[in-house]
Image (spheres, rainbow, N blue to C red):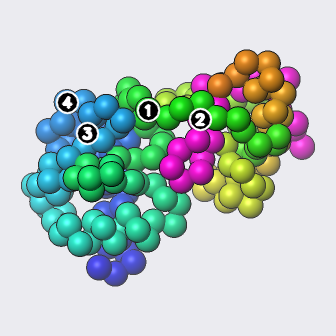
Amino acid sequence: MDNRQSVRIGKLISLILRHEPQKIGIAALEPGGYVPVCTLLEGLARLGSPLSREELDELVRDSDKGRYSFDTSGTRIRANQGHSVPVDLGLDPKMPPAILYHGTPERFLEQIRRDGLQKMARHAVHLSPDEATATMVGQRRGRPVLLRIDARRMHEEGFLFTRSENGVWLIDAIPRQYIQFP
């Protein structure tokens, strides 16, 4: 599978696993956000995008952002975060590093100054452990702005953080007093 095909099928898999499982006949994701691999592959074939198990394994392994993971048996797959459909990923609360980062397009800055960071249509607010990753995320939809989050203080004040399998930190919302603006 060439890079262009890999990107196209990866976007379709993300759409299915994060937002529209019904596209392949799944009413709701299984606990942990999983979908049976055979159901995903059959659904992709029905949509005109057939994929072999070996190609799926390669896509998961080579995903630059670690978007997907298999369960321990290798028979189920999930998106690691970014869901807009209800899902409990089964992630345990963790102590975050002192500072986390959020990259966002500049055009959202005034709203964030006013309302803090909200999950909007997603399952959680996504935070990065380093500036480079957050900047890369923020530039996907415009000129990026880097926000520093006082995660240590939030944790000390009772906020719960979780971390997905690919290292993205997740939280329900971030009030503006914990955000250091540029």
Would residue 1 appear left or right of 158 to someone viewing this image?
A: left
Query: What residue is disc 2 on?
Result: 162
Q: In this view, which residue lies farthest toward the bottom?
A: 2
Q: What residue type is labelled 1?
A: Gly
Query: What residue is disc 3 on?
Result: 21
Quarter residue 120 falls in: top right
Q: Which amino acid does label 2 sit on?
A: Thr
Residue 15 included in the magenta stretch of the image: no
Q: Which one is in front, 66 or 21?
A: 66
Query: What residue is disc 1 on?
Result: 90
Tag in front: 4 or 2? 2
Reading the chain from its start, which is encountered first: label 2 or label 1? 1
Q: What stretch is highlighted in magenta?
A: 161-182
Q: How far apart are marks 3 and 4 (CA)?
A: 7 Å
Would residue 42 appear left or right of 100 to someone viewing this image?
A: left
Query: What residue is disc 4 on?
Result: 27
Reading the chain from its start, which is encountered first: label 2 or label 3? 3
Q: Is mark 1 on a helix, strand or loop?
A: loop
Q: How far apart are marks 2 and 3 (CA)?
A: 24 Å
Q: Position of residue 167 (x, y in %)?
A: 59, 51
Evaluate if marks 3 and 4 touch, with contact meaning CB atoms under 8 Å apart: yes
Name the residue located 30 percent from the left edge and 41 percent from the top edge.
34
Q: Distance between the residues labelled 1 and 4?
A: 19 Å
Q: In this view, which residue lies farthest toward the front?
A: 72
Residue 82 image label: none
Q: Position of residue 150 (x, y in %)?
A: 83, 34
